[in-house]
Image (tube, rainbow, N blue to C red):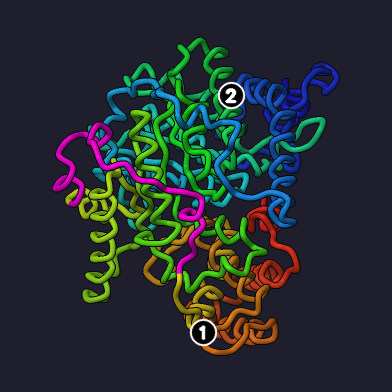
Amino acid sequence: MLESFGVYMGCHASVNQYPGCIVRIQHRPLARPEHELIATRAALEFVEGLQRTFAPRLADLLARRQARAQGLRSGADRLDFLPDTAWVRTGDWKVAPLPADLLDRRVEITGPVERKMIINALNSGANVFMADFEDSNSPTWDNVLQGQLNLVDAVRRDITFEAPQSGKRYRLNPSTAVLMVRPRGWHLVEKHATTDQGPVSAALWDFGLFFFHNAQALVARGTGPYFYLPKMESHLEARLWNDVFVHAQAALGLPQGTVKATCLIETLPAAFEMDEILYELREHSAGLNCGRWDYIFSYIKKRAHEPEALLPDRGQVGMDRAFLRAYSRLLIQTCHRRGVHAMGGMAAQIPIKDDPAANEAAMAKVRADKLREVTDGHDGTWVAHPALVPVARSIFDQHMPAQNQISVERPHLEVGRADLLLPHTGTRTEGGLRHNIRVGVQYLEAWLSGNGCVPIYGLMEDAATAEISRAQVWQWLHFGADVEGTAMTQERFRAALAQEMDVVRSQVGPARFDGGRFSEARALFERLSTSPGFEDFLTVPAYALLSP
């Protein structure tokens, strides 16, 4: 029931023929003719049903987020375990059994919904590929719709790609990774689809189109519609996802529990509600994941007005100590008690082909990180590049001979509020400041140009790592932090920003720099870093600048 369906899809129906509809494509036609296969009337009616049913609750939950953030800033609220849900934390319950193809998830690879990436990731030898509409995808209209079309082809094993320069053809191997999909977070909208009350929820748009086109085909192939859920801040937001799953399964005639979803614990409030999040999704749960990069960002954001939460250079904020160590160990204990997977975090390193010594140092960091995860009890881990799959697999194969470690008994750990809030100690350096500037601006420029997953200085950067860069600069500025013996000031930051833009220009080349969107990226990074208040997500103001 699309108001302007006829305009863009070749029909000539009047808007008035569909007086009850609330979803319509706006701003511009479909990016490519083949996107008609995605934006069908039936698919958009399905999304409309989701939006009609759940948009009011989503609006209320987002308002609750803002109210709590204000409470934390004013001191009227504080981060802690919820007294009203103590019965969930102390109760003896488990999530529903997992399907066979999700029992062994020792190595998962993630990446955007770009066609070649999908093929390479599914062929990588990883157990799972998480196709990402969120942090590693720049949500241009073309990327969003083409990503859905790419996944339709991948599910049906029809996906191919021919490299335009070399003519090399890519196709799926007989055996591939299990597919999981990450829709965008609750806080984002899809500006190209609107309702009578505003834009459609990006989360419902991404989930709805994928589920409608692929859920039944996945079940027919012996797998299922599996998801990763990002950025949640409370169990009530998990309850909303659970109700979305119930609604969607009923609408397509699928048994309840067909959907399985892993929740990323990547916000500080969610760390205090892990049990509750699993409980809300217990019929549909596939565990929790340590979304470490967004978690660091959330730690800064939720404690933005607490000087005792000042962090050192990003490179010194590691998973082996302080609040990150506490949260990862609590996540493992919580998941295993409930009979479900505890997934480790992302190894952002990528191969460094022209420097063997630097490459070996990077791989050593990956091995050490994965060794910590598997010996702590994680059931699997994430990598960002196919070359890291065998590196991570060798560590997990050596220390986890079974499919997972859910049933392995470990000593009980007491992880309390103070542990989850304990900041890292270390130094704040001029080099750390300048690295944040270069990474943040270069990533924003790539994102504004339509690329959400970017190799920068030997790491695969996405929106989460860019968030850390600008959040740290804001935090240091806000408190006038000591950076190598001198207080951080806006004048010092702006001088460093100007100098580092010259460095970036020399690194990428004048033609690339002058022909790109670096001036817009710089202006946005500067505004976010120096604003009196902390902007919740950089992708929200960046989305307003994003080319259609």
Query: What residue is drawn where x is 42% and y is 61%?
Result: 322
Tell which tag, 2 or 1, sits nearer the viewer.
Answer: 1
Where is 302 relative to 412, above or below?
below
Report the residue that reaches farthest toward the bottom: 485
Disc number for residue 430: 1
Query: What residue is drawn where x is 42% and y is 48%?
Result: 415
Position of residue 141 measured from the top left corner of the image (x, y, whole percent): 62, 44
The N terminus sits in image quarter = top right
Query: What residue is drawn where x is 38% and y is 27%?
Result: 156
Disc count in the image? 2
Which of the 4 image quadrants contains residue 489?
A: bottom right
Query: What residue is drawn where x is 59% and y is 65%?
Result: 471
In the displayed structure, does residue 195 sit left or right of residue 324?
right
Q: What residue type is disc 1 on?
A: Glu
Where is 154 relative to 364, above or below?
above
**Can residue 230 be seen at all in this image of the molecule?**
yes
Residue toward you, 486 or 157: 486
Disc number for residue 120: none
Disc 1 on helix, strand or loop?
Answer: helix
Is residue 411 within the magenta segment?
Answer: yes
The magenta span reads 395-424
Q: Which residue is mark 2?
A: 244
